[in-house]
Image (spheres, rainbow, N blue to C red):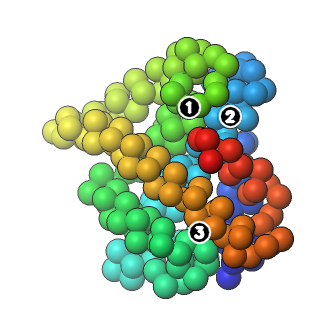
Amino acid sequence: LWDKFSELSTKCIIKTVEFAKQLPGFTTLTIADQITLLKAACLDILILRICTRYTPEQDTMTFSDGLTLNRTQMHNAGFGPLTDLVFAFANQLLPLEMDDAETGLLSAICLLCGDRQDLEEADKVDVLQEPLLEALKIYVRKRRPHKPHMFPKMLMKITDLRSISAKGAERVITLKMEIPGSMPPLIQEMLENSEGL
């Protein structure tokens, strides 16, 4: 199960890099800033993506390749003590009824975040994030004209996501010690020095 999860995580990282390159202005940033942003947001995006594929009736999460895991299986796949936090976050997302466009925009906003540590051009990153925030606000309000509070609620989820991500990065460090030599290089690279860890 750990091997399968590692394989899926590696694929997700590759997709996140491809996604980032499609964001307007991302490739105009310095290479160092692109790497910093990808490392900092990779776990955020991975967690957000899996949480949007949560099935509350079965208490399961479905990965992009169709693999479905329940809470115990997720725990055993390497999530460990992080499992309950991820499932709780998935439950909190349910009332927002986010569609793919909202998930994509929220992922992009997580990625283009000027407050990440060690950025060379944080102001430039903030400028790139502004139209994404505006697009999400307009889209959410158009989709839910009678629920004006939904846009700020979605943005507040980024804080929760980053908190879980920080714990996730700590969990990866623990896993590296528990399962020596089995961490795929791409996963290790993306999580090393992520937000100062």
Q: Nearer the viewer, residue 121 or 175?
A: 175
Q: Position of residue 81 (x, y in %)?
A: 48, 73
How far, Cα to Cα, is label 2 from label 3? 26 Å
Q: Which residue is mark 3?
A: 63
Q: Residues within 10 Å of mark 2 (few under 14, many from 20)?
A: many
Q: Label for residue 36?
A: 2
Q: Residue at x 68, y 56 (%)?
A: 12
- N-term mark: 1 or 3: 3
Q: How many marks?
A: 3
Q: Nearer the viewer, mark 1 or mark 3?
A: 1
Mark yes or no: residue 50 visible: yes
Instruction: Give the left or right position of residue 176, taking residue 85 as reference.
Output: right
Cβ atoms under marks 1 and 2 closer than 8 Å: yes
Look at the numbered disc 1 and give the secondary structure of its residue. Answer: loop
Q: Position of residue 17 (x, y in %)?
A: 72, 43
Q: Nearer the viewer, residue 14 or 104?
A: 14
Q: Residues within 10 Å of mark 3 (few under 14, many from 20)?
A: some
How far, Cα to Cα, is label 1 from label 3? 27 Å
Q: Which residue is mark 1?
A: 116
Kind of residue indicated by mark 1: Arg
Q: Residue at x 46, y 20 (%)?
A: 130
- N-term mark: 1 or 2: 2
Kind of residue indicated by mark 3: Phe
